[in-house]
């Protein structure tokens, strides 16, 4: 029996709109490395969408590669990046940031979010140590929208973090691998133009929102670092067939497709959450985005996995298991009905 999958938001292929566009443009010949009309058009559409006509935009291939390249380009070799304990760069990027000489400086978080107070306390204690010139120097704050647990920063929280960053001369960088889901959440008070004005750099994830691959790096409050294009290539992140990225993002930012598919995933996630609750399954995290976390017994987990694919997130002290279910542009009514049926059959 074929299993229905809620394992991730990139377990399907590619948005039909993108596939159709790639096929339609396939026979056209263009220059490489992003020097093509599709990439130019995509950049202009993103500048319009974020309300920053002078923003510097670059297209890379994947999220880890993007984080590594941006952080390495913005920091000196002796500088590090402040992040939450659960941050992707700290837990799930295989030491990619450290591989280029930049320590991830982990500080306590609330849930999975950094706080202005926590950053202020860390920096105050750091500067109070007379030996700090011998230490890794904090130079950047890394946040994720939404976080690894699907949580959202509010406008006020980001404004407070931005104020602390300015006080201590720290750059503020936002990982936007799932940014579309954060922006279209019913609980979000943040828009794309607002975010662009309140962080120094961020990226718009394509891979997790229906693209075949690709992330769009945006320098909105600062200019791109000197020789950033060359730095991208040094990191092995420069795609020779750059038009493949340009066409995809040009399509995502046509007719509001990027936000429309993200909104669909969030709506499916809300319904998925309701299905779990209706069957008496306890939610493990209060997530308003497309990642939903539930608590299952080992028996429930094994039985449910016979027909539904999902991710085991972490064991819990009481012997139960925190599991993650993720919706996407491709989640259907039939998928939700299959989950409902599977939950109804749990012993």
Image (tube, rainbow, N blue to C red):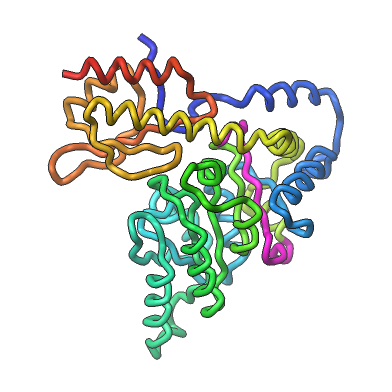
Question: In the image, residue 224 lies at what x, y percent?
Answer: 71, 62
210 inside magenta stretch: yes
Q: Is residue 229 above or below residue 336?
A: below
- Residue 162 visible in the picture: yes
Q: Is residue 289 left or right of residue 35?
A: left
Q: Residue at x 45, y 66 (%)?
A: 82
Q: Residue pushed farthest left?
A: 318
* Position of residue 209 measured from the top left corner of the image (x, y, whole percent): 57, 35
Residue under the point 28% across and 31% down? 277
Magenta region's main secondary structure? Answer: loop
Give the extent of the magenta segment: 209-227
Q: Position of residue 38 (x, y in %)?
A: 80, 38
Q: Is residue 16 left or right of residue 130?
A: right
Q: Quadrant of residue 21?
A: top right
- The residue at the point 55 percent across, 65 percent down is 172
Q: Quadrant of residue 62?
A: top right
Q: Which residue is drawn at the image coordinates 24% and 17% (left, top)?
A: 344
Q: Residue furthest bottom?
A: 130
On screen, residue 167 above or below 342: below
All told, the count of numbered labels is 0
Question: Does the segment drawn in magenta span residue 341?
Answer: no
Seen in the image, is 129 located left or right of residue 23? left
Horizontal and vertical percent position of residue 200: 62, 64
Q: Identify the image quadrant of the C terminus.
A: top left
């Amino acid at each position: 029996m074929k299993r229905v999958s809620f394992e991730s938001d990139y377990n399907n292929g590619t948005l039909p709109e993108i596939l159709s566009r790639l096929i339609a443009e396939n026979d056209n010949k263009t220059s490489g490395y992003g020097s093509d009309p599709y990439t130019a058009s995509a950049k202009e559409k993103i500048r319009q969408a974020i309300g920053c006509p002078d923003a510097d935009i670059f297209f890379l291939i994947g999220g880890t590669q993007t984080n590594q390249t941006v952080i390495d380009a913005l920091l000196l070799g002796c500088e590090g990046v402040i992040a939450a304990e659960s941050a992707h760069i700290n837990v799930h990027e295989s030491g990619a940031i450290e591989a280029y000489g930049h320590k991830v400086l982990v500080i306590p978080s609330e849930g999975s979010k950094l706080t202005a107070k926590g950053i202020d306390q860390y920096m105050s204690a750091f500067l109070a140590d007379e030996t700090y010139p011998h230490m890794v120097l904090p130079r950047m704050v890394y946040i994720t929208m939404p976080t690894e647990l699907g949580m959202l920063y509010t406008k006020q929280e980001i404004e407070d973090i931005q104020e602390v960053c300015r006080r201590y001369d720290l750059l503020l960088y936002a990982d936007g691998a799932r940014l579309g889901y954060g922006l279209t959440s019913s609980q979000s008070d943040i828009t794309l133009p607002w975010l662009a004005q309140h962080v120094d750099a961020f990226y718009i994830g394509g891979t997790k929102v229906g693209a075949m691959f690709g992330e769009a790096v945006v320098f909105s409050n600062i200019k791109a670092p000197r020789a950033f294009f060359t730095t991208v290539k040094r990191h092995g992140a420069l795609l020779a067939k750059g038009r493949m990225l340009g066409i995809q993002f040009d399509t995502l930012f046509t007719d509001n497709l990027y936000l429309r598919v993200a909104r669909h995933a969030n709506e499916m996630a809300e319904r998925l959450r309701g299905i779990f609750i209706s069957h008496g399954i306890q939610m493990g995290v209060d997530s308003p985005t497309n990642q939903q976390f539930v608590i299952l017994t080992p028996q429930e987990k094994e039985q449910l996995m016979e027909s539904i694919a999902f991710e085991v997130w972490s064991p819990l002290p009481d012997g139960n298991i925190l599991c993650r279910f993720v919706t996407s542009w491709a989640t259907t009514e039939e998928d939700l009905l299959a989950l409902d049926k599977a939950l109804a059959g749990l012993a």
